[in-house]
Amino acid sequence: MCSDSDPDTRLSRRRLLIHTVEALSIIGLAGASIPLLRACSPQGVAVKKNAPLKQDLSALDVGQMITLNWQGKPVFVIRRSDAMLKTLAPNANQLRDPLSVESKQPDYAKNIYRARDPHILVVVGVCTHLSCTPSYRPDQAGDLGPDWRGGFFCPCHGSRFDLAGRVFQGSPAPTNLTVPPYQLVGNILTLGEPNPGEHT
């Protein structure tokens, strides 16, 4: 009969204890790794990438633009002044698609302002020609022509857009800048979420 003091018994128990600890360590490591693996999986990245983005616009001054990063793209947000809004109607005869019939935008942006609130413009800051990033040029600079009233200029190939993101005739860009789906409640902008029941 073996006793607890028997070297073989102690060795067997030690091995059993070591194997039990190893097994529990592997199970614990696997359990801790699952959330990390889910976050790194393509589906986990897609969920994060497509998640709505909230931004408080209360500090955005009139005439100022901020650029947000949403779904890997720059999104321009401008608080337009009344003077800026007055420049939009006279541009119509110089624009390729003044009513945005051919351009991608939600139903709520199918107006001259291309916006929910006329004073807040929200557009994807990617030229529709070859995906360069246009520069915000609110000034009425002479280097962009005598009829320039402010807007966006793409330095890559010279496409010009007005202060509603509508493309001028003669520009290489085929369509207006894209208006993304968004909500605007007071000064809180939520990119990626239209209001319930709306079409984007």
Image: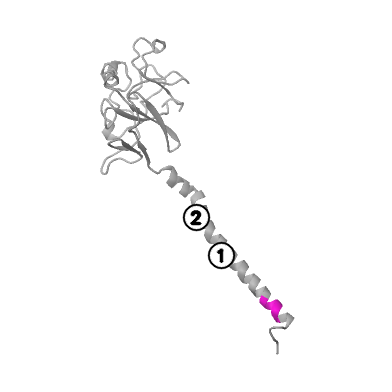
Q: Is residue 198 above or below residue 18?
A: above
Label 2, on which residue?
35
Q: Residue at x 29, y 30 (%)?
A: 115
Mark 1 Cα within 10 Å, few/some/many (few <14, many 20+)?
few
Q: Quarter holding the N terminus?
A: bottom right
Label 1, on which residue?
27
Find numbered disc 1 in the image and state the secondary structure of the residue it sits on: helix
Stretch in magenta: 9-13
Q: CA distance from mark 1 to mark 2?
A: 14 Å
Q: Residue at x 31, y 23 (%)?
A: 97
Horizontal side of residue 180 vs 40, given as left or right = left
The one of 5 and 195 positioned closer to us in this rendering: 5
Q: Position of residue 168 (x, y in %)?
A: 35, 18
Q: Is residue 169 above or below residue 43?
A: above
Amino acid identity at mark 1? Ile
Q: Position of residue 72 (x, y in %)?
A: 45, 36
Q: Quarter holding the C terminus?
A: top left
Amino acid identity at mark 2? Pro
Horizontal side of residue 82 vs 71, given as left or right = left
Find numbered disc 2 in the image and state the secondary structure of the residue it sits on: helix
The answer to if 12 sits in the magenta stretch is yes
Q: Position of residue 156 (x, y in %)?
A: 48, 21
Mark 2 Cα within 10 Å, few/some/many (few <14, many 20+)?
few
Q: Quadrant of residue 180?
A: top left
Q: Residue at x 46, y 49 (%)?
A: 44
Precedes in sequence: disc 1 or disc 2: 1
The answer to if 18 sits in the magenta stretch is no
Q: Position of residue 54 (x, y in %)?
A: 36, 40
